Amino acid sequence: MTLDAEARALLGEPDVTVSSAPPESALVGGAHDAARRNERMLALWSPPLRSADLDLIPEKGTLDARTRDVLRNDAYVRGGAVIHQDNIVGSLYALNAKPVSRILGPGFDDTWEEEFQAEVEERFTLWAESPDNWVDASRVNTFTEMVRLAVGVHVAAGEVLASVEWLRDAGRPFNTAIQFIDTDRLSTPATEPDNPRIVGGIEKNARGAPVAYHIRVAHPSDWRVPGRNMKWKRVPARKPWGRLQIIHILEQHRPDQTRGVAEMVAALKEIRITKQFRDVVLQNAVVNATYAASIEADLPSAEVFAALGGVDNPAEAMGQWAASYLSQIAEYSGGARNLALDGVRIPHLFPGTKLHLHKPGDGGPLGQDFEQSLLRYIAAALGISYEQLSRDYTNTNYSSARAAMAETWKRMGALKRMVADRFATTIYRLWLEEVVNKGILTSLPRAARTEGWLYQDQRLDALSRCDWIGASRGQIDELKETQAAVLRLKYNLTTEEDEIARMGRDWRATKRQRAREKAMDRELSLETPDDPNMVNAISGDPRQKDV
């Protein structure tokens, strides 16, 4: 049996015999012009046809290292990564619980949903945003900071890796905690390089589902404890009863892709060249700004060679002649009289020389169209608009700014759902599982406190369904966008929950606070009648009066 046949047998796949086929012509293509090989521009374009893992995993270490170097040293790229964190997560990532009462059975209705939402959101936020950082096993980050870190790691590596811990520290309100793991530590053990089931450190079953993760005890470059970086720990993906142990989030670009890759990898070469170009242009500008003028000599070559003729060492003679020539220029310039024209001094130069003036800082196309085109390329690679990346809004009007913001928001919304929401929901599910099993939630009916109830009929999925309120979308023209929101509400095209969430706020907390404020206004006799003109202005009524 061949090695390929053995690998297929281990994976539970049938042995397939490939029938012989006529060889592909090396000089001609088929019906597609892009497949032709007799074209001068396409003759040498023969990229390898390989699997997703074979394309990525051998080069992932280099790609990750270069991406991190760019993030550390290129201010524009670093700013783009921070824009992801600010536009997706913001300053507070708030839970908006939405349990599915119909799936949970008798005793679960709308009234119960409201009670459950209020209790679980307050309990989770109290734990997740505690200054004691209970959610983080390393006790460094709050929940919001961990979600921001997850988004940042995904921008740099295209994947997020963390382990689920069960800690018993004194004073800890809940045992669940999350430990981030550097993606560099997820790798195939050195003792099993030929194991077909382990790909990129992830052990899979016959259907490609993760079974276990092989994680180095220390980072590959960690030298502090010799030998630890050559030891691996096998961590099962789940506990025997199904509780998740490893959180691994990535966006697949091809089927059978095991590991993630950063989006900016496609533009790394251009980003690197762009930074080098900016450095060279800046250095050139500094040099040109150092000298305001220079004196250039146009001495004929024949006179130079005549002066150097008949010598054994031309280089030494050239040096002596140049020193003598320059000293005569210095002596002449120092003793020459200077004419003045309206206070401007005009020097008399040595015969054969001329004065060349330099514009300070003249170093190339920095900050002009060429630089803008490079920044647009980087912005496209990062999935954000040029205006946001460069902070240049000089040539932007309201319509173009709205269009750019809308395109950026589409990408940010997709990443929010795939990375931030998924990471946050996983933590919430793990915490909720512990809370329910411990019988802490008073809003749950007695039937929900029986052993095993949570793991039947997808009750954990129904109970843990939720949305996450992250960063505000932002407003360019607050009046116009407020009018649009009011009109959407007026014609039942949206909900107050969605509109308040656009501003990065929790609608229940906002309404409760407004109710308190209105009650206090009534108590203090501060309530004033609504101004009809103001109401018309906000609602966009064309019959509004000038005020």
Image: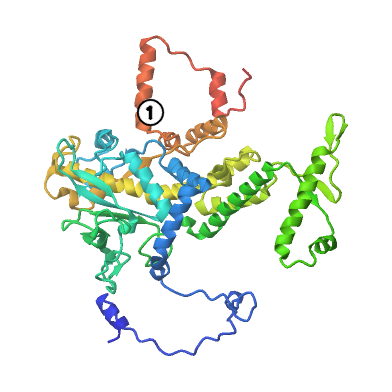
Tell me if I can see residue 361 in this picture: no
Q: Is residue 7 visible?
A: yes
Can you give x and y, in whole percent of width and height, for residue 26 in the image?
56, 85
- Going 76% across and 47% down the picture, which residue do you hit? 327
Which is nearer the eye, 324 or 256? 324
Residue 173 is situated, as x and y percent measured from the top left of the image, at 18, 37
Amino acid carrying label 1: it is: Thr
Residue 310 left/right relative to 75: right
Location of the N terminus by quadrant is bottom left
Identity of the residue drawn at 29% across and 66% down: 188
Under tag 1, what secondary structure? helix
Residue 205: where, in percent of width, then height? Answer: 26, 68
The part of the image, by quadrant, that contains residue 88 is top left
At horizontal 20% and vertical 53% (from top left) the residue drawn is 243
How many residues crowd around disc 1 within 10 Å: few (fewer than 14), some, or many (20 or more)? few
Q: Name the residue under label 1.
A: 510
Locate residue 451 relative to residue 145 in the image: left or right.
Answer: left
Query: Quadrant of residue 355 in the image?
Result: top right
Q: In which quadrant of the rendered image does the C terminus lie?
A: top right
In the displayed image of the protein, which residue is found farthest to the left? 451
Q: Which of 389 and 349 is in front in this view?
A: 349
Q: In percent of the image, x 54 and y 28: which residue is there?
A: 539
How many discs appear?
A: 1
Closer to us: 257 or 317? 317
437 left or right, relative to 326: left
